[in-house]
Image: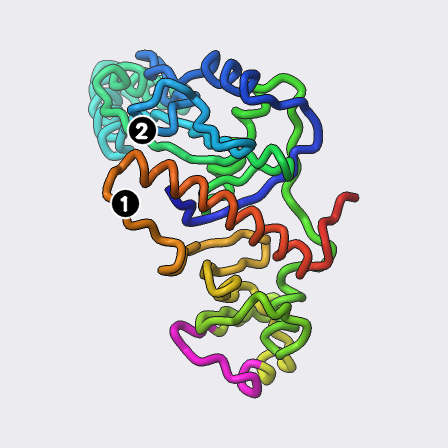
Amino acid sequence: MWFRNLQAYRITSGNITLNSLEEALSNHALQPCLQTEMQSRGWMTPREEQQNFVHAYGQQWLIALGVEKKLLPAGVINQQAKDRLAKMEQMQGYKPGKKQIRDIKEATIIELMPRAFTQRHKTYAWIDAIKNRLIIDTASTQKADELVEVLVKSMHGLTLAPLETQTSPSSAMTRWLSGTDLPSIFSIDRDCELQGMNDEKATVKYTHHVLEAEETARHVRAGKKVIKLAMTWDSKISFVLHDNLQLRRIAPQDILKESTEDVEELFVSDFAIMTGELSQLITEMVDALGGEDLS
């Protein structure tokens, strides 16, 4: 149970306890889509074997949002609607108007819904009750916003705000790549992306490439800024920092890997190790970016 991506939020208000969180999530559990629904959202247990909606390790709590969607391919809808419209035209003797076309498409979707396949996906999040942070395991801003929206609706009085820093990640990464101000606990790896600041947004990407200071400095002088930078923290965890403060491609190094073969034990130990290490990584990254911006 290691998060591969990370979007962080500050819990700005709301008194969350383990019991209140468990109760709130259980009251908003995921339900199957109704016949006339295209999507259903709700909370799931982090592991199917569990009954609790919160997996707790001390003050670190793991939760999971489930989303069930009906799959109705646009091609199927359009073909069915096209057939109906052709029959209508034959009966009327003239082509259907815009309102008739819209009504036929809506009726086709409603008729096909009960026969549609459903697909579920689960998005994990971790609440650090010590640091008052919500950490979401996704690279998708849309999925992160979705989880935040459902959590705020489920927990009365809870408010959240994206974690922001005094120094923008892009400005700091550009300096670090030039060999300036990089805290010793971080090291730069071999992936990087620079982007121009004009309308064309010319982009230079380095993949598995030794980043020579002279070469990258030339791009910076030409007006490009760093928007992605592969790094390693404390020789323990590698990741790619993005200019919106997302961490992606998070990978624990061998020193953190467990050898147990028991699936349940591995899940529990991974979560315990992950929360301890990532909490410290986030704190030190925020410090490296000038501290948290609470304005």
- Between residue 280 and residue 26, name the one nearer to us: 280
Instruction: Identify the mark at residue 260; answer none if there is no mark.
Output: 1
On whether residue 208 falls in the magenta region, the answer is yes
Q: In this picture, which residue range is highlighted in magenta? A: 205-216
Q: What element carries label 1?
A: loop
Residue drawn at the location 48% of the way across and 35% of the way down: 125
* Crowd tier of the residue under label 2, counting other residues whose Cα lies within 10 Å: few below 14, some 14–19, many 20 or above: few
Instruction: Identify the mark at residue 6; answer none if there is no mark.
Output: none
Residue drawn at the location 61% of the way across and 66% of the way down: 199
Residue drawn at the location 26% of the way across and 37% of the way down: 263
Query: How many marks on residues?
Result: 2
Task: Point out the frontmost of discs 2 and 1.
Answer: 1
Give the percent coordinates (x, y) of residue 212. 51, 84
- Between residue 77 and residue 33, name the one nearer to us: 33
The amino acid type of the residue labelled 2 equals: Arg
Q: What element carries label 2?
A: strand
- Between residue 65 and residue 26, name the one nearer to us: 26
Give the percent coordinates (x, y) of residue 158. 65, 24
- Residue topped by disc 2: 120
Does 257 appear above or below 156? Answer: below
